[in-house]
Image (spheres, rainbow, N blue to C red):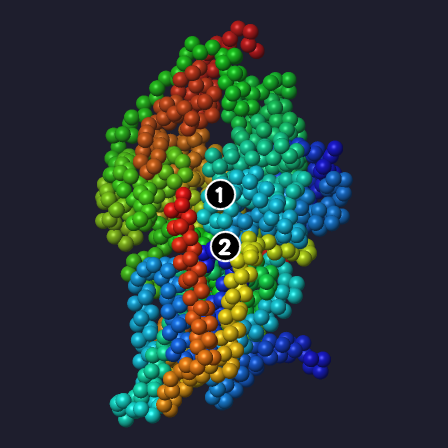
Amino acid sequence: MRPFEDYNPFVHLVYFVSCSAIVMFFLQPVTVVLSLLGALSLFFVRRRLAEGRSHLYSLALFLVMALLNPLFNHNGATVLLLINHNPITLEAVVYGIFAAAMLLAVLYWFRTFSQIMSSDKLLYLFGGVSPKLALILSMALRYVPLFAKQAKRVNDTQRAMGLYREENLIDNTRAGARVFSVMVTWGLENGIVTADSMSARGYGIGKRTQYTLYRFYRTDVLLLCTTLLLLSIVVVGGALGALDMQWYPTLRLPRTDALALVTYVAYALLSFLPTILEIGERARWNCLQSRI
Amino acid sequence: MELLTVKDLSFQYPDAIAPAVSDVSFSVARGEFVALCGATGSGKSTLLRLLKRELSPRGERQGEIAFDGVPIDALDDRTAASGIGFVMQHPEQQIVTDKVWHELAFGLENLGVERGIIHRRVAEMASYFGIESWFDRSVSELSGGQKQLLNLASVMVMQPRLLLLDEPTAQLDPIAASNFINTLKKLNRELSLTIVIIEHRLEEIIPRCDRLLVLDGGRLIDADAPRAIAARLPADARLMRAMPTAVRLFRALHPHPDTAACCPLDEREGREFIESTYDNAIRSLPEVSAAASERAPVALEIDQAFFRYERTAPDVLRGLSLTVYQGESVCILGGNGSGKTTTLGLLCGLRHPYSGRVSVLGKPIKQYRGQSLYRGCVALLPQDVQTVFLCNTVREELKGTEQAQASLPYSLEHLYDRHPYDLSGGEQQLVALAKVLATEPEILLLDEPTKGLDAYAKLRMIDVIRALQSKGMTVVTVTHDVEFAAACADRCAMFFRGEITSIAPPRAFFSENSFYTTAASRITRGHFDGAVTVEDAVALCLQNKLREGAL
Amino acid sequence: MMVIKSARLRTVLRWLIPFVLIPTAVIVGLLVLEQRQHLLVTLAVVLLSLLLFLCSFEKRAVGVRRQVIIAVMVALSVAGRFIPFFKPVTALTVITGAYLGGESGFLVGALAAVISNFYFGQGPWTPFQMLAWGLIGLFAGLLSQPLRRSRAAIIVYGVISGIVYSAVMDVWTVLSYDSGFTWSLYGAALLTALPHTALYAVSNFIFLWLCARPFGEKLERVKKKYGV
């Protein structure tokens, strides 16, 4: 059992896309709750309570989104109250809450995804589609910190030469533009040397190979197959109507027959798969350590 | 067995009046370590680039270049790309990808080498160069020396038979430069790698290379073993200034070119030569009274300053105190990360200590409002002088500075129509200095002013600083270059971990240091006292008698 | 394709069909049809269009130097985001499109979206941003003649494309929120985003006003000097 983060990036891509696509496609209370819990548990298992304030923003976003729907959407049969002659309905309120929860779930899935998907991994995936583009991306990624550093240097030098004047926004904006402009010159000149260095090492003489640090280990294949299996169960279940849901004009509760239950269990497993892996891996380490 | 043969090679750039390279013929044997030297503009970079087909400049070329018996134009793409490796001057600009491992694999990917083989070769190369511990890092986290080593490794991974290097150590600090040259020597000795290198700093290269090619005005004027060239080079030749201290010392005492003489090349040989040739009845030169400046008013003062870049980061400056008097030239020396550049930032108000005081011309720096600090008060010439330029021509760059320029000890008019980026390193330095001096500052701060300069430009820089100082300007210089500090400082300060460990006039400073000191001091140590420059050593030698039996 | 004589028109169509006609048809169709799962369908179409473009780029021979210049422009537009007041992605994409052609413009826009999301977070919105910014660059390339000729034109184009960009991204916001598409919700989204959009338009205006000419000249210089 390896930490979830160390699996092959392709497995990550398939996993996160499956999880978020299901909840976006089959928007219904059970999937939304499962997905949200899965996403949150993964996030907190990995990060504990780091980035505390960002969760408050997420909560605020959730509240705004949940409120927006009943204000703009007046479908539904059960009228709770009237605002400006517009009915606020129970159905719209409930839908708003679940739609906002779905967004929150997707947000958290992709937050973890962004943390895991380092540039190396993205390039590995991109390289499969277009090696040339992957290389351009890699170059750009190398340039960003380089340019930022150089821009800071130019800025310092120019400041010490009196380019900026305090309390004069227009002049300072103009000065900023000049610094950025000289960065363009510098970047382009710099790039030409890089291009030389690429040609000197034989870039463009023939078909390239892609060297990557990532392999498919047995465990990768296992996790990928599990993900795909669970995904297909949910999709088949959904196609057979197990996840059908009626929001308007009146709410009808999600199905609870055998097919629906199997589908829910499959999606629950899918949602909590990485959390289970993380916890299992930690337990194993604790166990190993206590034996030493 | 000749690996590289160049016959009657001439080259002229489009729009140029004279050829950049004319009638050059030479050959390099397998396993040879050859240094190509000459002043800026002697055509050495052009010649080196002509040897690498992919980097060959556009223009008119005549003559033959053959690699392993095959004309380079007839080589197939793979051999041309992998057989001849090329490392350039700037460590940053040659790197293509964002990760160390990817950069190492880049060349092999281009050749279409199979993944398994790339894996093996990259692993092997990383282990040989000691890159393993930073294999996974982003290149932006590496130091300059590490970057250049990475550039070398990612060329070597393609298993070239000939390695061309264009001033690879010019942008490195002395320790990283010495490491780099040692790695080259190791490759040459262990793998019989053939090397052709251009270097300004011959101090490190001359004792290690097999042959020296001397270019002047596009012509090959001499080619021989370094010892022979050192002995027969005219004593006033431009190249002489770039020679190692031992050579300059020897030739100052034996000014007539003499092929038979056994010229010392490194410090050990220099010491043997001095000790076996000269008596030491007079051990030191008379003291010069340097205390006059102490009585001048204070120009800059840092009082127990503490500084860090972030709250959680370690201190860069730990209780630093430094006083600089008006009209004085102070050189700050020390290793990387010892807080030298940060100190300059403090002195020109770019950084502020979280504890401690900084004052300029007797007034706390915080009391300078708006731009008043930068008007006629303090000016900074940064390490990377390209950051000074904002315009497309030197003329626009220097617009409105005519008055300040008139008082400069040099003229720039011949450069007016060029793009600042197209100038040589030394010229860029002078243009940037002119622009910085336009505010007519009383205090000039210089950050590594000799980085990347050839010996001639460096001497000119020393003259310029001396001239400015004679007009009453206070100069504070941060440098790695001990020879430079010995030549143009009134006082030298040694930085270590954000504080000053010693500060003294150069003669006392360098003769008390045992490792961090000038080559002349290392050569004469124990034999003479307080000889820190070649001039000092020569003067002492001439005052003493020749030993019996010596030449 | 053989019937159309003008090579220029052919190129225009080659771009127009996958990037504009298909997505428009799909979006309009979805709106009219009032079906569910618009988001995923749109996402799929966006991804396909991107894929189509990337594959065609992969097959074409593009000079080393042009590739490096694209990388430089991408990096500049991302690094520029850290300068206060400056959001140069749109402006740089427009300039690249106008001076180096639609393909380069598209790539700069699309890749800048990917890379800036390394700092601001990847998500299902990444392909939307890629396509939106890419198209801004692409059209700038198609309109390169007038854009290069007058500063006013390039400023107007930049400001409008900035606004359109925000509007397109709001479609994504609405789609992702509600599986259907409601105009009232879209209106609300546009309204809440208004200060941001306005700031963005102003920043684009200032940036292009100050930089369009000099940056274009720089690109021209490099093109000439190094034969890109």
Query: Does residue B449 appear left or right of residue B474 in this picture?
Result: right
Query: Does residue C19 appear left or right of residue C1 in this picture?
Result: left
- Identify the chain of the residue marked 2, using the numbered disc in the image: A
Q: Are marks 1 and 2 on the same chain?
A: no
Q: State the residue position of label 2.
A: A142
Front residue of this view, candidates B65 and C188: C188
Give above or below for B37 relative to A281: above
Q: State the residue position of label 1.
A: B133
Query: Does residue A220 appear left or right of residue B110 in this picture?
Result: left
- Identify the chain of the residue marked 1, using the numbered disc in the image: B
Q: Is residue C212 visible?
A: no
* Quarter of the C terminus of chain B within the rendering: top right
Give above or below for B328 relative to B439: above
Task: Identify the image quadrant of residue B198.
Answer: top right
Amino acid carrying label 2: it is: Arg
Task: Identify the image quadrant of residue A244.
Answer: bottom left
Q: Residue B188 at x, y = what percent?
A: 62, 33
